[in-house]
Image (cartoon, helix red, strand yellow):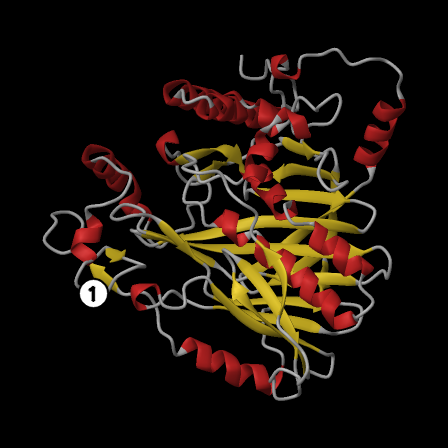
Amino acid sequence: MGSKDQGGGAASSGGGFFSSFAAGMRSWGTAVHKSVNGLLGYEGLEVINPDGGTDDAEEEALRGRWKQEDRDSYWKMMHKYIGSDVTSLVTLPVIIFEPMTMLQKMAELMEYCELLDKADECEDPYMRMAYASAWAVSVYFALQRTWKPFNPILGETYEMVNHQGITFLAEQVSHHPPMGAAHCENEHFTYDITSKLKTKFLGNSLEVYPVGRTRVTLKKSGIVFDLVPPSTKVNNLIFGRTWVDSPGEMVMTNLTTGDKVVLYFQPCGWFGAGRYEVDGYVYSAEEEPKIMITGKWNTYMSCQPCDQEGEPLPGTELKEIWRIAPTPKNDKYQYTHFAHKINSFDTAPKKLLPSDSRLRPDRYALEKGDMSKSGAEKSRLEEQQRAEKRAREAKGEQFTPRWFNLTDVVGSTPWGDLEIYEYNGKYTEHRAAIDSSNVADETDITSIEFNPWQYGSSSSQ
């Protein structure tokens, strides 16, 4: 049994002051839901309209992206999994996918990484945490997209450069259970995560639990932050317009000093009341509120120094510390400009690894609008992955990640324990060797065959 990771832990509030504050926030209630009655075969499924009340649930049930025949087929396949973790149990149609993988999705947290640069440069220990927590909130605008990313193939990677001086690398380190690890750094910070999503299928909704460990180290001070985000619920999977909510607490802990930020994500109430709202405080290690933080996770975050009662200090003003960047109009997948950069080869480094997500033929076909080819390629890759597993078992071997090592540390999260992977530094050496080479790289990146395979691309033959 590995050693237990004591950092972070369950998302708990900082002191009695916040406990009463959070209790008041919870009294807002949740979005109105109503069972779909009178529709044969779908009795008991809940439809939740985030913008309405109880009377329009049946009208809402007739909306959404599914055609009747597709919805019926999906339900026949999925209803037996109610109450189960469906992270990798079922093969889903590409009609619900976006042209991005989970590894690329992990990189979206870097869109506003300049907030971590500001945290590193900041001398005030509490403002430092305000900037870092605003960075953690900023990704939720992207997470509200209702399309499913592709599950990465074991050994798949994603690399990103040419953004705020960062070098980002993610690798799929396990297939059962699906787990990814990532490392990112620039001159101001390093970021490390081990991620293992856990889900619970509820029929017309899906609860997503972010089982993982996130660590951010600021280089100037050496301070280390631990992040525990709230869970997420995807509503109206079959009936109604799909939408996402993440009610609950986000806790960021300064493992060096004991200071922490506790933010409460409001649940969506009647007619959208409270939707997107985030409120909380930066606390000292002595659990005294120092800075109040407020905003909306889809728009902006602001902060202001406060007294021990959590009230704004006289002579201070509310200061905006983050605002969402302009987004493309009428984008099919609700992508931000940064999401398009993630898929672009403009952010790929020289001599891109052939295991990179951009090169997946199913992802690329979907990006180009060829859903039929995307589905066929997805099936081919999944079968090739199964063939690789059979070959590995026949040889009596185990998969070993290339860029991350499994440690003996077991992390504790509110949703279960987690084996921790750590960056092994080999990618830094790999990139340094490439960057120091004077040999011109004339390879057409788009012509590289996707190859994450342990035994080569012929393993399925």
Is residue 415 something that shows in the picture?
A: yes
Asked if residue 408 is positioned above or below residue 150 in the image, the reply reads below
Looking at the picture, how far across and down is residue 21, in whole percent?
52, 82
Which residue occupies the foreground of this view, 334 or 54?
Answer: 334
The three-letter code of the residue at mark 1 reads Thr
Which residue occupies the foreground of this view, 427 or 409?
Answer: 427
**Which quarter of the picture shows residue 227?**
bottom right
Looking at the picture, how far across and down is residue 12, in whole percent?
59, 74
- Residue at image x 46%, y 57%? 232
Looking at the picture, how far across and down is residue 288, in whole percent?
68, 84
Q: Which residue is mark 1?
A: 54
**Which quarter of the picture shows residue 127?**
bottom right
Looking at the picture, how far across and down is residue 248, in whole percent?
49, 67
**Which quarter of the picture shows residue 213?**
bottom right
Which residue occupies the foreground of this view, 195 or 88?
Answer: 195
- Residue at image x 79%, y 51%? 189
Asked if residue 253 is positioned above or below residue 446 in the image, the reply reads below
Left or right of residue 142, residue 58 in this image: left
Left or right of residue 310, residue 441 in this image: right
Which residue occupies the foreground of this view, 5 or 278?
Answer: 278
Q: Secondary structure at mark 1?
A: loop
- Residue at image x 83%, y 67%? 123
Asked if residue 278 is positioned above or below residue 40 in the image, the reply reads below
| Quadrant of the snapshot with the N terminus | bottom right
Asked if residue 410 is positioned above or below residue 95 in the image, the reply reads below
Number of numbered discs: 1
